[in-house]
Image (cartoon, rainbow, N blue to C red):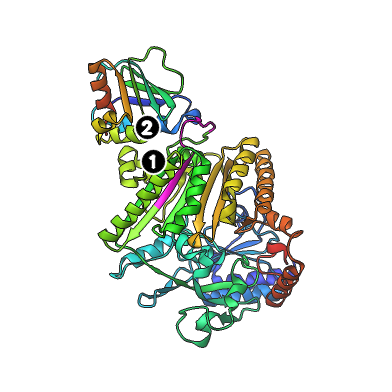
Amino acid sequence: MKMQARAALVRVTELLGEAAVRRDSATLAMYGADMTENAPGQPDAVLLVSNLEQLTAVVGLAGAAGIALTPRVAGTNLGGLTIPSRGGWVLDLTAMNRIVKLDLDDMVAVIEPGVTFQQLKDELDRHPRKLTIGFPLSPPDTSVMANCLLDGLGNLSLRHGVMGEWINGLEVVRADGSLLRTGSWALGVPPFARAPLPDLTGLFVSMQGSTGLVSKLAVQLWPSPNLRERSFAFFADLAGAMRAIRELPGLDVLDDCGALTWPTGKMLLGVAHPRERDPAEPEVFLYLDVGAHDRELLRAKQATLRRYFAGLRADGVKVEDPIDIPTLVRLDPRLGKFAEFPTRLDFLLDHPDGGLTWVGTYGPMSQFRDGAARGTALMVEHGFAPTIVARPMKGGHFGVLRFIEVFERKSDAARAQVLALNQKLADMALELGFVMYKTPGWAVARYQRKLDPGFKRLLGEVTGLLDPGGMMNPGRWGLG
Amino acid sequence: MVKVRVLEPERMSLPGLMLQGILERARAAPSSRLRGEVLVDADGAQVTLRFSDQLVEITRAPAVRPVAVVRGTLRALLDAALGRGRVRAWLAGRLRVRGGPLTLLRLLGALRV
């Protein structure tokens, strides 16, 4: 370790206290890796940061000493984004978990990086005005901020798009340790929107921490309907299900909708390694979520759905009317995993093989059928059960198509195999117009050849301006 | 307490896995007099239930000489397990059963949550 780095570590230990600076090999190994196929890194130290003052001081010290910084909360993203690719310090922001402000009238929450989906839900549930945030399929203890900043999605994304769009404003610690605020917040007024000031928020969204460390997020909340019915419909084949998720947003009756292929359903029912599909069994389970503020509206929406499904059957699609989740739970409680959000999909997260990864993409709904079919073929060819999740987003303007693999994480051969498959899936998806979100480094490398030269140049200039020392989560987007 | 075991779970179909859940949660344990193989066909996906003393095995291996056969849509079978519209489904041809009346009575009891 260089002299400057040693001095910075001494100084940061004085600042945070010895208990908050971890350098033991077990901790470094834990923070250097995740559950994906991405190669582990080797941080020099893990710092447990508790407040904004500490964070700005740490960033200032690291900047002066040229130490790379990797921010992290739960570390459960599937892009390897919290693996410190160039060593340095991993900043664990879990303890920065204050809900700074909950403005129920203006439907906005101001939160710190460590605030989790469960924590925010619990807080929102305490108030008489029923508001909610969209919940991803990641575990309840993951960071709301991380999912927003990484353009993730949630169970309200069919209506409201990616969670990056829900950001009203940010407070950011820049590479030199200074602070800035974006959105209407920049004028010292409440963060009600990003408009109408120049939208600097975008400089920090999907940048994976390479332009600054966000210390506060103002995020939109949404009214929570009084009544809700969640159900599953079983489709005999992929083509019918893909048609439905393309058409259903147009009915404007759903809050959420998602297709899960047969391996997901079987894992949900306790099969660790589903290997074979009976050609006569359903290929896809379609999850449907209908919300309404009164019973009359709920009934009207359900009637619209029934008519739609009857129309599908009349067209020869093999599907029956959806079955509500409470009914399915009577048959098997394990089917209750989608009854409430946030939820923990333990059959994926706690899989005995330990490895979990995906090619998660956003792309045009018109290409879903081809994408799912070609992805299925590739996964089968590589010996994986075709575990695919597809959801329409933003009223059907685009959608998410994910190819998920569980694998034996400790095996180098399995990791290499899964990486080879993922690269093929990502290439196939890009050919059809699908782009990976929470984009892992290996995918960025593949995108470099195709990226518009002007985009690449400006991206380099912007990050050079905001992070001249190349210390902010270096290596992301091929930078630093 | 009757044990329910899925043979080769990695090959088991969704109807078979759901039958496991139903059998484990059935209101009444299968009668000890319910023995032998039962063929269940859900939309063409066939599974065999093997009833023996204190054990039900679920397999995709074909039933050799089934003591009963239940055929229907997956939805009709699930509705039947919930005690909903069995007669209507039977009249509409969405659920068909074959076997001795006593066997069928015992079987339907074992498949009712």
What kind of element bears circle 1? loop
According to the picture, the residue beneath numbered tag 1 turns out to be A320
Q: Is residue A280 inside the magenta stretch?
A: yes
Whole-percent x, y for residue B43 in the image? 41, 30
Task: Judge whether A469 appears above or below A143 on screen.
Answer: below
Quadrant, the N terminus of chain A:
bottom right
Q: Residue furthest top?
A: B65
According to the picture, the residue beneath numbered tag 2 turns out to be B73
Q: Is residue A314 inside the magenta stretch?
A: no
Tell me what residue is drawn at x 24 percent, y 21 percent: B106
What kind of element bears circle 2? loop
| Corner quadrant of residue B29 | top left
Magenta residue span: A275-288
Let me know if residue A356 appears in the view. no
Mark 2 vs mark 1, CA separation in Å: 9 Å
The one of A383 and A64 positioned closer to us in this rendering: A383
- Label 1, residues with CA under 10 Å away: few <14, some 14-19, many ≥20: many
Task: Judge whether A102 appears above or below B48 on screen.
Answer: below
Q: Both on one chain, marks 2 and 1?
A: no
Tell me what residue is drawn at x 69 percent, y 76 percent: A64
Q: Amino acid at mark 1?
A: Glu
Let me know if residue A263 appears in the view. yes
